[in-house]
Amino acid sequence: MKIKKNDQVLIISGDDKGKKGKVLKAFPNKGKILVEGVSIVTKHVRPKKSGQKGQIVKSPRPIIVSVVKLVCPKCGKGTRVGYEIKGEKKNRVCKKCGSEI
């Protein structure tokens, strides 16, 4: 998976199309990521004890990696990710401007 935690991403399809957000967590086994402020779901929670009130909780849900593009920190555009090998290190590279990510 080419997208990691703390990356800035652009949503390219779905209800949140056009939004940008920071990746909070990555789930490489499932091919999903958790993005800040995107795919918010409301959940009604029952009261746990008597006398307590029920509440509505809003929380982000994981989205599929294929609906996001990485935002290059240098050019600021949504881009595909390539790899470049320098010595023994493998670095991610922006396909638009060629800079390291």
Image (tube, rainbow, N blue to C red):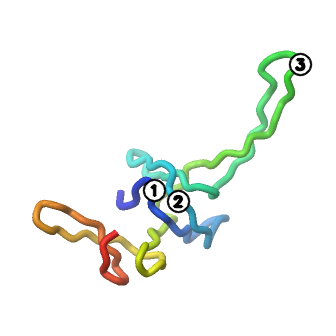
Q: Which residue is mark 1?
A: 6
Q: Which residue is mark 3?
A: 51
Q: Residue furthest bottom?
A: 97
Q: Position of residue 20 (x, y in %)?
A: 58, 67
* CB within 8 Å, label 3 to label 1: no
Going from N to C along the chain, the mark reached first, 3 or 1, is 1
Q: Position of residue 75 (x, y in %)?
A: 43, 81
- Write the residue at 47% across / 52% down: 32
- Write the residue at 63% across / 49% down: 60
Query: Circle 1 sits in a helix, a strand or a loop, which is it?
Result: loop
- Quadrant (top left, top right, bottom left, bottom right) of the N terminus: bottom left
Tag 2: Cα neighbours inside 10 Å, few (<14), some, or many (≥20)? some
- In 3D space, how far apart are the residues under numbered discs 3 and 2 (Cα atoms)? 38 Å
Q: Amino acid at mark 2?
A: Lys
Q: Residue furthest left?
A: 87
Q: Position of residue 89 (x, y in %)?
A: 17, 61
Tell which of 45 and 94 is nearer to you.
94
Q: Residue furthest right?
A: 51
Tag 3: Cα neighbours inside 10 Å, few (<14), some, or many (≥20)? few
* CB within 8 Å, label 1 to label 2: yes
Q: Which mark is residue 22?
A: 2
Q: Quadrant of residue 45?
A: top right
Q: Amino acid at mark 1?
A: Asn
On screen, residue 75 above or below 83: below
Query: Circle 2 sits in a helix, a strand or a loop, which is it?
Result: strand
Q: Position of residue 14 (x, y in %)?
A: 62, 65
- Quadrant (top left, top right, bottom left, bottom right) of the C terminus: bottom left
